[in-house]
Amino acid sequence: MSYLQDFSTDISKIKLPKKFTFPFYYKPHKLAKIATSELQEYLKTQTDFTHNFGLENQKENAIGKMFGVLVVKNKEGKIGYLAAFSGKLNDHSLPKKFVPPVFNMRAENSFYVKGEAELDAINLALDQLVNNENYIALKKYFTILTTKIQNDLKAQKLKLKQAKLARKQKKQEAIKVLNNDDFKKLTTQLKQESYNQQFFLKELQLYYDAKIDKIKQQITVFEDEITSLKKERKATSNYLQQTLFSKYAFLNVAKEEKSLLDIFNNPAVKPPAGSGECAAPKLLQYAFLNNLTPVTMAEFWWGISPNSAIRKHKNYYPACQSRCKPILTHMLQGLDVEENLLIKNLSKNKELKIIFEDDVLLVVNKPAEFLSVPGKSISDSVYTRIQQQYPNATGPLIVHRLDMSTSGILVLTKTKEANKALQSQFINRTVKKRYIALLDGVLTDKKGSIQLPLRVDLDDRPKQLVDFTYGKNAETNWEVIDIEKDKTRVYFYPVTGRTHQLRVHAAHKNGLNTPIIGDDLYGKKANRLHLHAEFIEFLHPKTNEKISFCVPADF
């Protein structure tokens, strides 16, 4: 079995994990780390395939890639590991070091290759039509002619209006000097003149309409063919996609098979692009097909980070939510999997300290890993505890929020009026806030400003992406406090308040490119996220006096 790799490291004294890895939130087991290290050594020196990962200053057209390792046990009880990569390599090769795809759409003479050839032929025909010299010339002439006609008709209508005013004035002057018979003759003459001018305008309009219709008919010949080809392309593409979805069939430990269409099970929503091409499904599929028992797994990023998402070279990452979660939910059925810590209430035994209180305000020091408001799976939060403690409080209580992993000052209100007044200050950005963070690296600059617009990653919630097209404006000012043991302590002064703003601005390659210590979404796990809302200043909603609070970080 060529894809099952032996450990070159001695693993004989390492205990196997009791349960399989929960792929959406995990700390890599020692065996997975060793397998990762061996695979990364291979990637440094391999000559089996060509792919520009953006390492060694090859930034142009570079694409980083997610790799995965799956430690397995065969029927004889021997431990080894499998390796896989997500998506495709630049050279479209399938090196023997990595397990094959769940379905090889690019196999010679496959329906997909033939379908792609059909689409290429349609696209070529479309391109030739759209760029046809006669078609382009006709459209250009049509635009020029239409503008010319519109201007001419506008000028003719203006002449008619002026002629009408001239006739009216002529009649007003004539009635003073002409007798009845002569005035009637003049009136008849002027009416005929009006009729002649209107008839000319109508005839001119008909002439122009016929001229435009002739050009339109010639253009329509091209556009009908273009529309027909687009319909054919859409039908071909839909057929290819649906057939492809049916070909991707995934096993679980009981050898129960489900296609992508069955797994996503929603006719109105297509499986996301690339579903089934990630490393984790490939690894588990190969293991189940070959009667290998999954022991533990891990995925890591290799190469340059994308422009929008945050990926650090060699860092471990969980499986994605939109593509992998439905697939892996099926594939992991029957395996004894580790606890899902994402739905575990980590705040149960944590104290929520009130640092200030009066008749309209509450200021609390929120611990790390404590929700500001209830979540889907965890109800314990600042909101629910304060609601229980102050049942007579009116209004929404919560004025602003902190991320679950962020500790620090959170302001609440006891009345609707106070909430409205304080919310207005947040909306108008008159509230002064300061955060303190410990970054996993050394910054060379002493201070600066970061402006990277953010939006939610629709394929991997709740992560955020940098998006200059659809993202919301996000701005953060920062300054270095000190540097200690290759770590940088900084102040963050957020101008805006987007979800994960400080975490993304710290970690993104176009931000500080230095994640906050303990950031399990954009950096590496630690005992906690080293981000703390240390200071806040605002106008008291009742007295209108300036008040401020400061709570030092415990890191």
Image (spheres, rainbow, N blue to C red):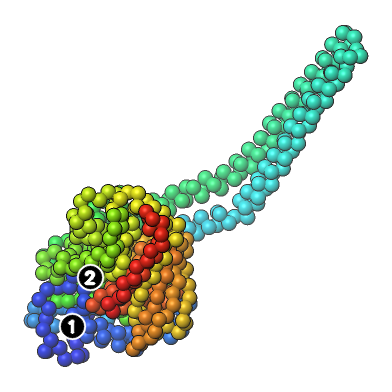
Q: Secondary structure at mark 2?
A: loop
Q: Is residue 371 left or right of residue 305?
A: left
Mark 1 vs mark 2: give the one in front: 2
Mark 1 highlights which residue? 31
- Quadrant location, the N terminus: bottom left
Residue at image point 47% right, 82% down: 445
Depicted 204 relative to depicted 295: above or below: above
**Closest to the observer, 243 or 503:** 503
Give percent across and percent down for residue 552. Answer: 31, 75
Alpha carbons under labels 1 and 2: distance apart: 17 Å
Q: Is residue 104 left or right of residue 21?
A: right
Please name whichever residue, 2 or 9, is drawn nearer the observer in this view of the structure.
Answer: 9
Between 273 and 349, the one lying in front of the other is 349
Quadrant of the frame with the C terminus: bottom left
Mark 2: amino acid: Tyr
Residue with the most extreme top position = 180
Q: Mark 1 Cα within 10 Å, few/some/many (few <14, many 20+)?
A: many
x then y, percent, for residue 145: 69, 44
Q: Which image quadrant is residue 249 in? A: bottom left
Q: Image quarter for residue 363?
A: bottom left
The residue wearing badge 2 is 25
Hey, which residue is sitting farthest left in the picture?
76
Which amino acid, mark 1? Leu
